[in-house]
Structure formats: C-alpha cells, structure tokens
Image: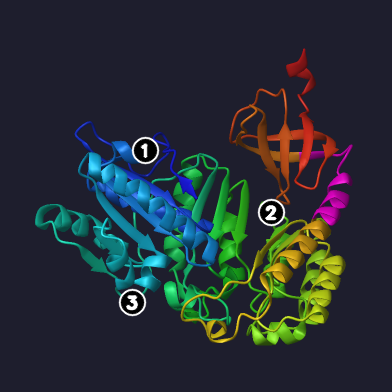
Amino acid sequence: MASFRWIDEVSSVRYSEAMTKRVYIETWGCQMNVHQSERIAGLLAQAGYAPTTTIDTADVVIFNTCAVRQKAEEKVYGRIGEVMQVKKRHPVLFGFGGCIAQVRGAELMRRFPAIDFLFGTSNLADLPGIIARVASDEERITHLPPAAGTEELPVRRMSTVTAMVTITEGCSNFCSYCIVPYSRGPLRSRPPQHVLAEVRDAVAAGYPEILLLGQNVDSYGRDRPEYGDFADLLEQVARIGPRRIRFTSSHPRDMTSRVLETVARYDNICNHVHLAVQSGSNRILHAMNRGYTAADFRAIVDRARTLVPEINVTTDIIVGYPGETDADFQDTLRLIERARFGTIFVAKYSPRPGTRSARLPDDVPAAVKEARLRAVLELARTIALNLNRGFIGRTVAVLVEGRNRSGSYYGRTDDHRTVTMPDAEIAIGKIVSVRISAASSAGLTGTVDVPAEVRR
C-alpha cells in the first residue's frame, strides 16, 4: 500500500491558491497501480483538488486497488471500515477503483454502502465528472467500461527521482492463474510518440531515472506492429539520454535477444531484468499457460549474462499451484539454484475469480504452501547474501533515492541492489560513488567516496 507524498516543484500539474477541495489517494499493488494513482492525482488536480495525506482532512477519498493476491484484497476491505468511521464525522465521498472494482463490480456496492462511486482500470478521464455527479445528485455510481485503447492523462508524480512512464496496458497472455487480462483488458500499446514525449518532459524536469511500465513490456507493439517492438522503443528512449532507464515487467515468453542486445549496447539502460519464472516444473509451467519450459528460461538467463555479464536477474515464484507435487517443487528449487536470482518475490497460490485455475481444486494444503514458501525464501536469502558479499570492497555508482527510518540515505545500484549509506550527507536524486563495506541478503552498506577536492 502507498499513500502519496506529493511533489509540487517538479510536477506537470501545479496547484492554484483557489483550490479548496482535497483528495486522499491510497494505492495497493504494483508500480503500474502507483503510476495510475499519479495519473488520477494529475487529473483531479486539473479539476481543482489539492492533495492531502489523511482521510480525515479529505473531501474525496480514493482507493486504487489490486486483485492479484487474495491477501491484498482482504487488506483493502479492512481499510474500508476506517473510511466508514470518517464518514460518520463529516461528509466525504468515497471512490473505490482499480482491479478489485473491475472484477468484483456490483458485489462491492451491495457489500459496502460506504462506497459512493465505483470505477475500474480504464476511462479514468471520466473521474472528475463522476465525482461531480455523485456530489450533486447524491446517487451512487458504478462506472466499469471495458478497456479500449490507452489514455493520455496529466501526471502528478510522487517521486523526484524516478519518473514512471506507461508503455503498455493490459495483457493478452492469459496465464491460467492471472487476473490481469480480466481486470485490465487485452494488451494495448501506447503510441511511441506519446511515450517519447513524456520521457523528454521528465528528463527536462530533472528526473535522473525513467521507469518504463507495462504488465508485460516485452509484448509492446504486438497489437500495433506499426509501432515497432520493445527493443525499438527502448533504443529510442535510450537515445533521448536519461541518466538511467529501467523497465518492468518482462515475460519470458516474449523476451527477445534484441531487447537484451539493446540493454548491452546502451550504458544508460540498467543492468537488471525482472523475469517472472513462476515455477521450475515444466508440468506446472504448462498448466499455468506460461508458454516456455524451464530449459527455455535458463537459456534466456544464460543469454542475458553472456551479453551483460553484470546483469542482475530477479524473479517471481508461485508455490502451491493446484496439483504441484513435491517433485514439481524440487524442480523449482533446482532452477533457483541454477539461475542465481538476485531477488525472488514469492507468493502462495490463491485462486482469483474468473481465471482458469480458479476452476481447479486448490488441493495443496496451506501448511505445505507455507513450508514451500519458507524454503524458497531461505534459498533466496542464501544466494542473495553470497552474491552481495561479492561487492564488498568494490566501488559502485548509486542513485540516491531517500532516507530510511533511521535517517540513513539509501539508493540503488545500476543492477538494482539497494545500498544504505549511513552518516552521509548527500542530495537525493544524485548518482554517487559508494565503497561497499558490508552486505546482507537484503542489500549493501557503504561509504560515499567523496572526491579529494571536496575532502580538503
């Protein structure tokens, strides 16, 4: 979950003194959802809404939700009670949107009377009008049109460091467990001229890092061949000249050598790729409709490391998919050991409404899922610790992103490793040289290498 800390000085949308209405936005889920909330914020800024960081001070509360995991969905429902309490104290309009809204629809309006308007994952430009209608007519509204095309909306960015830029929306791969094609619709590629214009604007505004976003960035252009493919777009973004370029997420089925060759060719494209393997069992991969085998996946990783020896490959794993046996799970552990992932995001399988796997018996016991999750985490931490220890004594370039709760600055290397810099006084958004002195499975610790002329 993320609530917004708004950045005034670098936004493409500015507030006027005349703004009296306030909006609170709370976000669950992936970076796509976070960026969608930035776009909602930019849209509502044009409609006269200034941001607020608490529900109590808001005229409008918006929840932008995620339906990928059952646990995330349950957390959202738990938060609705807090909105209900605020509504008892003063008038506030409550909008519930995103993937849960798109999938659950009218069920939510029946279950939660506190919801004043329901909106989905597309046609966000209609939000100001929906809010105005609810405020004047005092009638609840459900607005869930099917996804069509992409929208060009103003952006109210949350970060001064990373500018997120959407290149695709939706997905047409229909993995058996995944809700995205149902909640966000089929693949829709954004016109390249719009992507490149947004990148240029972000670079001109001083953003050191561009993050290209899509449910599956590697499928860019599959629906619109005239746009070119992802490798073409990535090269055009690199030529604009941002200091750093990242992209997420990548699907192994659609990853091409041309993309990896482009990463190798341009120094400003970061040496990191997030490839969600999900399982190391060919039987389970087939059941998941992933479109590749474990050997195919290993070949992609090998090709990436041949082209970019320093590349950090991270991944997602699902444990306890219906029918997953101990032998299937051992295949997954073997793939992890072979691939040597820098980071693994692991989740226990949970059936999602409307997906093909939801029709299967959820037959892996909860205790077995939990044990498998712990086994993956333990192996992942061991591998990450060994990899990170290899950085001790090295000097790396770190983009400074902020300060943690203890007051230390932190940032990331080119290959997406987190670095903490205690006792440093450095500017957020700068790229600094850091000599690494310690490592854990979670990241690195180091000292900023101050140039000699500064030390004097």
Residue 270: assigned label: 2
Whether residue 394 appears in magenta in the rendering, the answer is yes
Badge 1 crowding class, 10 Å Cα cut-off, few under 14, some 14 to 19, many 20 or more, is some
Badge 2 crowding class, 10 Å Cα cut-off, few under 14, some 14 to 19, many 20 or more, is many
Extreme residue toward the top, this view: 456
Residue 370 located left or right of residue 427: right
Whether residue 84 appears in magenta in the rendering, the answer is no
User: Which residue sits at x=22%, y=31%?
Assistant: 17
Q: Which residues are magenta?
A: 381-396
User: Which residue sits at x=30%, y=52%?
Assistant: 43
Residue 246: assigned label: none
Amino acid type for the residue under numbered disc 1: Thr
Badge 3 crowding class, 10 Å Cα cut-off, few under 14, some 14 to 19, many 20 or more, is some
Amino acid type for the residue under numbered disc 2: Cys
Work out whether 265 lies above or below 363. above
Give the residue pinned by disc 1: 54
- Count how many numbered circles sit on residues in the image: 3
- In 3D space, how far apart are the residues under numbered discs 3 and 2 (Cα atoms)? 35 Å
Residue sitting nearer the eye, 307 or 280: 280
- In 3D space, how far apart are the residues under numbered discs 3 and 1 (Cα atoms)? 32 Å
Q: Is residue 444 visible?
A: yes
Residue sitting nearer the eye, 396 or 359: 359
Amino acid type for the residue under numbered disc 3: Pro
- In 3D space, how far apart are the residues under numbered discs 2 and 1 (Cα atoms)? 36 Å
Work out whether 424 lies above or below 68. above
**Mark 3 or 1, nearer chain start:** 1
User: Which residue sits at x=56%, y=51%?
Assistant: 210
Residue 146: assigned label: 3
